[in-house]
Amino acid sequence: MTTTARPVALKVGVVGKGGVGKTTVAGLLARAWAERGRTVVAIDTDSNPNLGLSLGLSLEETEAVPVLPRSVVVGRAGGPAAEDLVGEYGRPTPAGPTLLSAIRVAQAGAGCTCGGHATVRSLLADALADVDLTLVDMEAGLEHLSRSGGTLAHADLLLVVCEPTRKSVVTAVRTATLAAELGIPKVLAVGNKARSPEDEDYLRTALAEEGLAVAGVLPYDEDVARADRAGAVGSPPGTPAVRAELETVLDAVESSRGSLAADG
């Protein structure tokens, strides 16, 4: 991995249709950014939180991460500062990023998760001191973009994870439309689970036809799947091809970071 000068802070949401490998990709990207020397905070907003597993924590350690308080107004009206929430509720991971858990459904009939989403939205609106990248792993689907104000309304960039299916591409297009309505400045697609050159060509062509820029296409890697099934912790899996494509995605985001800073 290449170490570069410290950049302007960036807030990135990772979204996608269920089953595309979104959380696995989010974990791999967070690891790769940390390996570049970036300070990374990774926020798990899935009501069935598993991002900790992708960052090298055991299941027991992932379950023990405390959940952020609901409906907190961060940094205003006497509310806690963002860095205070990270300090109290964040947990270090073997992969490098600090993990926050925003939502967990542990009891049937406990009600909606709106309060957790409100906290994440407020957290993204406040400045995180000494954090280069805040990465938010969202729950699958589009509902989080339809909430009042939008959970990711203060994100700088969305990465939409897609597998080589028409349904996944359609979901990516719908996501980009909603992101534009929320005023999110940039949307990039990340292909995943490409098993052949035809899969990669399909993703690049179909997404380009819909006007979505592709940051990279990750090949399907049995080592990643095997490590997930085994509950492996520690060093990230991945062939050189996967790791090279992760670097391509990071470079695309870093390039976007420059244009976003200029627009700001």
Image (cartoon, rainbow, N blue to C red):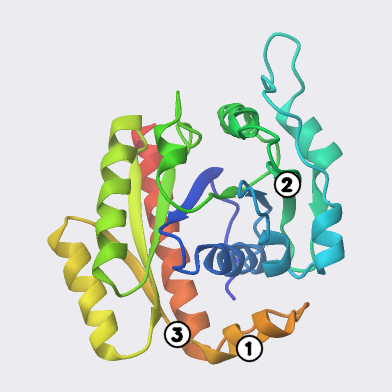
Query: In the rendered structure, are the residues bearing label 3 and label 1 in contact, judged by CB atoms less than 8 Å apart?
Result: no
Type of residue at label 3? Tyr
In the displayed structure, would residue 192 be above or below residue 190? below
Viewer-proximal residue, 213 or 140? 140
Residue 256, above or below 155: below
Q: Which residue is mark 2?
A: 100
- The residue tagged 1 is 226
- Cα separation between marks 3 and 2: 28 Å
Q: Amino acid at mark 1?
A: Arg
The number of numbered discs placed on residues in the rendered structure image is 3
Indicate which disc, 3 or 2, sits on the residue closer to the N terminus: 2
Q: Nearer the viewer, residue 229 or 205?
A: 229
Q: Is residue 168 above or below residue 155?
A: below
Q: Which residue corresponds to the image point at 60% horizontal and 26% vertical from the top-left?
A: 122
The span from disc 2 to disc 1 (Cα, nearest Å) is 26 Å
Look at 57% across and 69% down and name the residue there.
24
Density class for disc 2 (Cα within 10 Å; few <14, some 14-19, many ≥20) is: many
Query: Which secondary structure, mark 3?
Result: loop
Q: Quadrant of the N terminus?
A: bottom right
Tag 3 residue: 220
Relative to 181, 82 lies left or right: right
State if disc 2 and disc 3 touch (CB < 8 Å): no
Secondary structure category for the residue under label 1? helix
